[in-house]
Image (tube, rainbow, N blue to C red):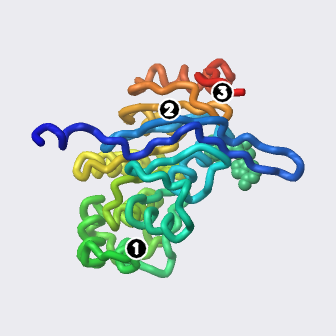
Amino acid sequence: MPGDNHKPRSVVQTIDLKKELSLGTVTVHALRGVSMNVLSGEFLGIIGPSGSGKSTLLGLIGGLDTPTSGKVYIDGLDITELDERSLTKIRNEKIGFIFQFFNLIPTLTALENVALPIQFARKRKFNPNRRAAELLELLGLGDRMHHRPNQLSGGQQQRVAIARALANEPPLLLCDEPTGNLDTKSGEVVLQALRGVQKQTNTTIIVVTHDMEVATRADRIISLVDGQIAQDVPSVKEESFAKLKNKLSTGELAPIVTKE
Ligand SMILES: Nc1ncnc2c1ncn2[C@@H]1O[C@H](COP(=O)(O)OP(=O)(O)OP(=O)(O)O)[C@@H](O)[C@H]1O
Ligand SMILES: [Mg+2]
């Protein structure tokens, strides 16, 4: 039907997501009931103080970890009910991960690092080397394809990691502080790369970040405090970001939903 294609659909939905972890005899409430909905093509930033549950949330959304209770839907499918085999399949087909440390294989060239997940894909959509070369070109690394990670700068390595995360064209990209280890200039290049990918392929991107440059460029920002959502706003401007960060660190910003 005309028009239907333009209706944004939910790519990620979490419902009252909780995660408890035991540390010896102590129970840590890493997430205390997080409900959120992320639409197709959105660039969502997640911010919050250290220990507020950002990485935990990302791990649950990506099916790297299971919640104590609550639900995670990816493209409408409840992934909390899946066995490890089906979960691995969803991860491989639908989700790309980018971590703070690039996790590239040191003995492989940039091209080989990016081609690897394509070679391993169960249903191969692309020619591995051709696709890897195209992605590296897209990310401005056309002249670095045959370099190994230790022959690349931090920003270049992170762009290789982005290319690798995109290799099988996942509709969802999860990034945990992708610019955390980079200087401002490299961080900017990585951010541009993510933005470019989002525009060109309508990929949904969720980025956990402390970086103002990243946060102020997101379409929407969720702040986590103590395992709960404290704020969900369309965007933040540079001048209000410092204030927001300050409120988060002083505890002035309290969770919206208080359960129990
Ligand atoms: N394996 C674990 N065992 C016990 N507690 C854990 C474990 N992993 C995380 N936690 C606790 O869960 C809470 C949330 O951790 P999480 O890593 O999600 O925070 P974060 O917001 O990503 O912090 P940072 O900004 O420092 O990366 C913290 O209190 C942390 O100490
Ligand atoms: Mg973290």
- Residue 193 against residue 53 in the figure, above or below: below
Could you tell me residue 6's position as x and y percent?
Answer: 19, 39
Which kind of residue does numbered mark 3 sit on? Ser
- Give the Cα separation between the discs numbered 2 and 3: 15 Å
Could you tell me residue 226's position as x and y percent?
Answer: 68, 33
C-beta proximity under 8 Å, tags 1 and 3: no
Does residue 183 appear in the picture of this structure? yes
- Residue 138 against residue 29 in the figure, above or below: below
Which kind of residue does numbered mark 2 sit on? Ile
Numbered tag placed on residue 117 in the rendering: 1
Residue at the image position 50 percent from the left and 55 percent from the top: 79
Q: Quadrant of residue 165?
A: bottom left
Quadrant of the drawing holding the C terminus = top right
Q: Is residue 27 left or right of residue 225?
A: right
Residue at the image position 36 percent from the left and 42 percent from the top: 10
Dot in front, 1 or 3: 1
Numbered tag placed on residue 222 in the rendering: 2
Q: Quadrant of residue 116?
A: bottom left
In the image, farthest residue toward the left: 2
Name the foreground residue: 126 vs 185.
126
- SS for dot 3: helix
Numbered tag placed on residue 68 in the rendering: none
- Residue 159 against residue 120 in the figure, above or below: above
Which kind of residue does numbered mark 1 sit on? Pro
- Give the Cα separation between the discs numbered 1 and 3: 39 Å
| Count of numbered tags | 3
- Residue under pointer 3: 249
Asked whether mark 2 and ligand 1 are closer than 8 Å, the reply comes as: no
Q: Is residue 40 left or right of residue 73?
A: left
Residue at the image position 30 percent from the left and 64 percent from the top: 141
- Give the Cα separation between the discs numbered 2 and 1: 31 Å
Does residue 182 appear in the picture of this structure? no
